[in-house]
Amino acid sequence: MKFSRREFLVDSLAAAAAGAVGGCATRGHAVGCTYPGWKPGEMDIHFIHTGTSENTFFIFPDGTTMLLDCGHVKKRKPGYAEALPPMPSGERRAGEWVRRYIERLIPQREIDYLMVSHWHSDHFAGIPDVAGSFRFLNYYDHQYPNVGKYRRDVDDADFDVFQKWLEPAVKAGMKREPFKVGAKDQIRLQHDPTGYYRRVFEIRNIAANGVMWDGKKNLVDVAGEHVKQTGQKHINENPLSSAIRIRYGDFTYFTGGDLEGDFVGADGKKFSYEERVGEVVGPVCVCKTNHHAFFPSMRDAFVKSVRPQLFLSSAWSPNQQNVVSLSRMMSRENYEGERFVAYGAIPDFRMRQFEKLGFTRYLTPPGHAVVKVVPGGFAFRLYTLSAEDESMRIVGVADFTC
C-alpha cells in the first residue's frame, strides 16, 4: 500500500483544503471533490451502499458493464433500520437508488451483463427497479436452467415479481444462458475489438449452485454429493451462490455472494465449502466478504487463502458487523500486511465496540466504496463517496499497489 492509514488521512485533509480553495479543478481526486468518473483502460468497481441491499456495478477496461446483484429488504427486525438506516433515505426502494446511481456513471441505457448470485431478496429484488432505465443484454443466475433444484427459504413474492420481469426481458432480446462453472471466457469484454485488454483481463467462474471448479480442469458437484451422503434434498441458498474471480493485470478481485456453510463429502466427512473455494481462488487484492461478513462466514481458513488488502462488506443488519468476523479478517496470524475494511456504514454502538478493541484504524470512512484500478492493473485507488446524498462527493481516498 502506498500510504499508511495515518499518512492517508493527513493527505486527505490536505487535499480537502486544496479543494476548498478551488483545487478540484486540478486535483479532482481530492476529498471534497466530485468523483472523477471512468476513463478507458481503468476498471471501476462500485460497491453501492443502500443499507438494505448488496449491489455491485462494474465498468471494465474497455467500457463493458455488469451489475452483480441488486436487492431490497422490505422488513427488518426492530432496531435494524435505526442502526443502519436506508441510504440516502427510505423515500425510495434500494433498486431505485441504485438505478439513479448508475445513471450518473454511464450515458448509455444498456448494461452488458446482469448476474444474480442467489435467490435472497437483498441480492435480487431491486433489479426490476434498475430495469426501469436500463436494458440488460446478457443474464446469468446461479441455477438456470435448474432453478429451484435445492430451493429453500426464498421470498416467494419477490421471486415471483422478479420472474414476471425476467421472462418478458428474455423475449425482448436479453440473452439468458447457464452460468458455466470453470469457464474463463463466458463473461468477457464486449467493446475490445483488437483484444488489447483481453490479453490481461479475465473473469473466472469459480462456483454456482453447489458446483465448484477445482482450480485445474475438473468440476466438483459438492451439493450433489452432500445430498447423496445425507439424504437432505434442501440446501440453503447461501452456499449455492455463484462466485467469480476477476483479473486485470496484477489486480485480482473475488466475489461470492453469501457463500458459506459445511457440506459432507464422498468420504462421509463434513468440510467447509468456503474453505475449499478459498483454496481455489487464492490471494486477491480485494475481496467482497461472504454473506456480509456474518460470523458463520469469513472463517480463518478462507481469510488465510485470499488475504486481500481490502475487504468490501455490505450490511443491513448490525449482526453482519461483528467482532468474530472482523477479528479473523484483521488477524496477523492469518496473514501479514496492511488491510482495511469498507463497511458502508457502522452503527455507533458497533463503532464504540470496535474502538475499544483497536479495530477502528482498519476501517474506511462510511459511504459507497469505489475501487478504481489503474490501466494495466498494477495498482488501485479506493474512493469513498458520500451515501447520504447523490452528490458523488469524495469523503475518503487511499492508494494501493497490487
Image: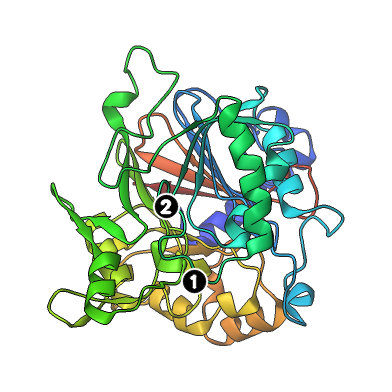
Residue at 73 percent across and 32 percent down: it is 133
Spatial CA span between label 1 and label 2: 23 Å
Observer-nearest of 196 and 337: 196
> Could you tell me how many numbered marks the image carries?
2
User: Where is mark 1, residue-wise?
Assistant: 293
Identify the image quadrant of residue 318.
bottom right
Residue at 61 percent across and 26 percent down: it is 172
Q: From the viewer's perspective, tell me whether residue 153 is left or right of residue 246.
A: right
Q: What element does badge 2 sit on?
A: loop
Observer-nearest of 1 and 183: 183
Identify the image quadrant of residue 36.
top right
Amino acid type, mark 1 = Ala
Residue that extends furthest to the right in the rendered view of this protein: 91
User: Where is mark 2, residue-wise?
Assistant: 143
Task: Tell me if residue 79 can be seen.
Answer: yes
Is 138 drawn above or below residue 270 in the view shown?
Answer: above
For label 2, the crowd category at 10 Å Cα-Cα, with few meaning under 14, some 14 to 19 and many 20 or more, is many
Q: Which color scheme did the rendering employ for the protein?
A: rainbow
Observer-nearest of 62 and 138: 138
Q: Position of residue 237 (x, y in %)?
A: 47, 66
For label 1, the crowd category at 10 Å Cα-Cα, with few meaning under 14, some 14 to 19 and many 20 or more, is many
Is 239 drawn above or below residue 138 in the view shown?
Answer: below
Amino acid type, mark 2 = Gln
Q: From the viewer's perspective, tell me whether residue 383 is left or right of residue 133.
A: left
Observer-nearest of 344 and 262: 262
Q: From the viewer's perspective, tell me whether residue 241 is left or right of residue 353.
A: left
